[in-house]
């Protein structure tokens, strides 16, 4: 156990490293945070839908998704409620593989990320095309548990964690930015933790 002063010193060091964003504290546990119930997963009926400004709209089954290229990344995770969890090992399908298969049209500038129970969040497409953005089904070495978004969640390490939608079900590519679930009640449209883009000015 770290004493409070050790913890403070460690946070100071990490801040100096540029790894802990302003206003954040390190957590060693992994909190569970979401609205609503944990959805049930049936691999026989589950689909991932990709539509909007793409040349080839997709409806992928669980097995089709599993057959796609895979990748493992290590990344920090920053929740807007001020906890950060370092060194998460995520494994899954890179968003770039999905984008390539769907064929992103030049007019596509934003993505509405869709999850179970109507949860949505938005991001510029260029952010999702970063090489470390994954459709993760493992928090390695374990499969992603249902409370952490299993069977599949998006992971966007460089934005606040509300953009990392749990129970991911699809993407809609759009020309204009549209606020998602939390953005509609005042969370920032972009959400960069290093610029403390927590809430929008009202
Ligand atoms: N579908 C869905 N995804 C969601 C949320 C949610 O309410 N619903 N909450 C977000 C928030 S605010 C955070 S901090 C992370 C938390 O992920 P965790 O519970 O695995 O720590 O999930 C994000 N993804
Ligand atoms: Mo969060």
Image (tube, helix red, strand yellow):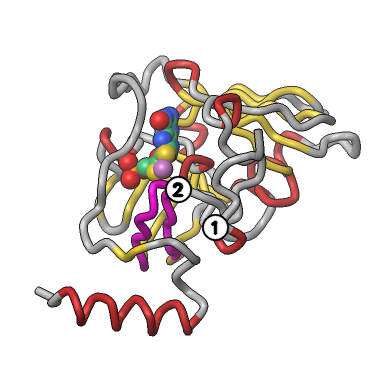
Q: Position of residue 198 (x, y in %)?
A: 55, 47
Disc number placed over residue 193 in the picture, else none: 1
- Residue 167 visible in the displayed image: no
On whether ligand 2 comes within 8 Å of the CB at mark 2, the answer is yes
**Residue 167 lies in quadrant:** top left
Q: Residue at x 44, y 62 (%)?
A: 23
Which quarter of the rendered picture does the C terminus lie within? Answer: top right
**Residue 57 lies in quadrant:** top right
Compared across the picture, whether 153 is left or right of 32 comes to right
Question: Is 68 situated above or below 29?
Answer: above
Compared across the picture, whether 34 is left or right of 155 comes to left
Disc number placed over residue 80 in the picture, else none: 2
Question: Is 117 situated above or below 9?
Answer: above
Compared across the picture, whether 74 is left or right of 93 comes to left
Taken as a whole, is the magenta stretch helix, strand or loop? strand
Q: Nearer the viewer, residue 36 or 104?
A: 36
The range drawn in magenta is 75-86
Q: Quadrant of ligand 1?
A: top left
**Residue 7 is one of the magenta-drawn residues:** no
On whether ligand 2 comes within 8 Å of the CB at mark 1, the answer is no
Compared across the picture, whether 106 is left or right of 191 comes to right
Q: Residue furthest right?
A: 106
Q: Position of residue 14 (x, y in %)?
A: 40, 79
Q: Position of residue 96 (x, y in %)?
A: 66, 49
């Amino acid at each position: 156990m770290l004493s409070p002063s050790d913890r403070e010193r460690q946070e100071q060091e990490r801040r100096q490293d540029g790894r802990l964003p302003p206003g954040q504290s390190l957590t060693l546990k992994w909190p569970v945070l979401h609205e609503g119930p944990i959805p049930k997963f049936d691999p026989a009926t589950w689909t991932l839908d990709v539509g909007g400004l793409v040349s080839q709209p997709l409806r992928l089954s669980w097995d089709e998704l599993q057959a796609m290229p895979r990748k493992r990344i290590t990344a920090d995770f920053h929740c807007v409620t001020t906890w950060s969890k370092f060194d998460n090992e995520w494994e899954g399908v890179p968003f770039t593989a999905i984008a390539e298969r769907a064929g992103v049209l030049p007019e596509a500038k934003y993505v509405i990320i869709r999850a179970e129970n109507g949860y949505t969040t938005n991001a510029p497409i260029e952010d999702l095309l970063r090489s470390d953005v994954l459709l993760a089904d493992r928090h390695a070495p374990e499969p992603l548990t249902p409370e952490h978004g299993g069977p599949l969640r998006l992971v966007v390490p460089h934005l606040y964690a509300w953009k990392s939608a749990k129970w991911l079900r699809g993407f809609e590519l759009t020309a204009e930015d549209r606020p998602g679930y939390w953005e509609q009640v005042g969370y920032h449209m972009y959400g960069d933790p290093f610029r403390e883009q927590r809430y929008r000015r009202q």
